Amino acid sequence: MNVLAQPMTIAGLLVTGIGVALLGSIKLSLARRLQIDEARIGGLVSAFGFTIIPMILVSGFLADHFGQKTVIIVGSILMALGMFILSRTNSYGAALVSVLLLGSAWSALVNAINAIVPSAFPGTMAYATNLSNVFFGIGAFITPIGLSYLLKRMNLPPILTVLGILVLIPGVLAFAVDFSQLFAVETGGTAIPSVEETTLGELLMNPMLWLCSLGMFFYSPLEASMGAWSTTYLGNQGISEDTALKWLSGFWLAFMLTRLITAFTISEGAETTVLIVLSLLCAAVMAMVVWGRGAAVGKSAVIGAGLVFGPVFPLILALLLTSVALEARGRAIGIFFAIGAIGWTVIPAMIGAKAKKEGVQRGFIVGVGSAIGLIVVSFLFMYQLG
């Protein structure tokens, strides 16, 4: 394996983690700089999410046709460009353009990096996907903490300029990586078949593609909703804002810890069994959020959610990557994330609408329904794989 392949992959995972947490971490500073209200900032955050749905699909087709190397290089450049524009803009229109670039770049990098994870982290597929997503989680975890510290000491433009330089690292490293040699880890040294050897029609006939995508549809809103509303939920349980933020950090730490543990402990072939157990625990935790009362229960629910949510996405991704041909991986990942992004968008909106009428705690009953959907999909995995 190329000596720079793993550093490139780790850098890409950290950058995508930073990218997904960036707007939420700078929204208050950006609102002051642009002199806009919370609603328009919310529009920028939504624009990032909506951009992902079409662009991660497009990125998959581009990756399969032109190679992951090209997509990583272009994605790094686009992300740097988006940050440079955002660092210098004083208008909402230019900020929107930068967000569209960031969403497109994030989509490109997530698609291409996830496709090379099994080659960059040799071992079982579940080992590769869980370990790699620890690095993604680190990027997402340190971004709000790091930016909060930096924004107290300097202005937003120089911070974004430096970040714009740093996000070029995966693209720079990609120039030096021989991707044919990298994929030889999986192919046993044979050439990768051409994209025509697995047509789109054949890919769409793969039942595991749709099961994995449906699993992502039901899982992704659980993670997004707990990340978005856990501090409000804990506040309603009588916990102060500062303490609630610490427990939210605990959620993300538990989230990464179980991914790390799973990477080194799960045996090949146990993915579906573990997913069934985790999906049942997801439903139990969401039920605890809805019907539990008191600070102790609230804290336990938030940490419990981190522990059981952590390995779910990597395990579903492992099943996807195992079930599709290497030359179709980009398109499969694109469909997988696009359908997941729909769930990520629609179900939290349903939670928010119910929370507006009945409170955040009752709003999470929608999350219970989503967890039940994940349970059904997990049993279907076992049926499909025999």
Image (spheres, rainbow, N blue to C red):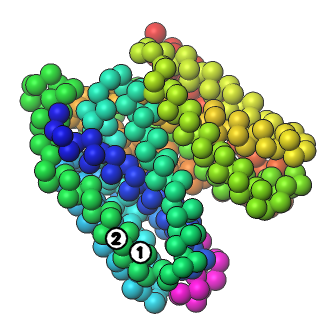
Q: How far apart are marks 1 and 2 (CA)?
A: 6 Å
Task: Estimate how packed mark 1 is, as few (under 14), some (14 to 19) or many (20 or more) residues with alpha carbons within 10 Å.
Answer: many
Task: Tell me which corner region of the image, top left, top right, bottom left or bottom right, holds residue 3.
Answer: top left
Q: Is residue 227 above or below residue 263?
A: below
User: In the figure, is residue 23 to the left or right of 97?
Assistant: right
Say whether marks 1 and 2 touch (CB < 8 Å): yes
The residue sitting at 42% across, 26% down in the picture is 126
The foreground one among 377 and 190 is 190
The residue at which mark 1 appears reads as 160
Q: Residue 215: percent from the left, percent from the top?
A: 53, 34
The residue sitting at 79% across, 43% down in the picture is 299
The foreground one among 229 and 168 is 168
- Identify which amino acid the numbered label 1 is placed on: Leu
- Numbered mark located on residue 193 in the image: none
Q: Residue 92: percent from the left, percent from the top?
A: 48, 85
Q: Circle 1 sits in a helix, a strand or a loop, which is it? A: helix
Q: Is residue 306 above or below residue 90?
A: above
Q: Main secondary structure of the magenta part?
A: helix
Residue furthest top in the image:
386
User: In the figure, is residue 148 to the left or right of 332?
Assistant: right
The residue sitting at 23% across, 57% down in the picture is 171
The residue at which mark 2 appears reads as 164
Q: Quadrant of the N terminus?
A: top left
Regarding residue 331, the answer to whether it shows in the image is no
Task: Give the magenta part as a residue range.
Answer: 31-45
Q: Residue 284: percent from the left, percent from the top?
A: 75, 30
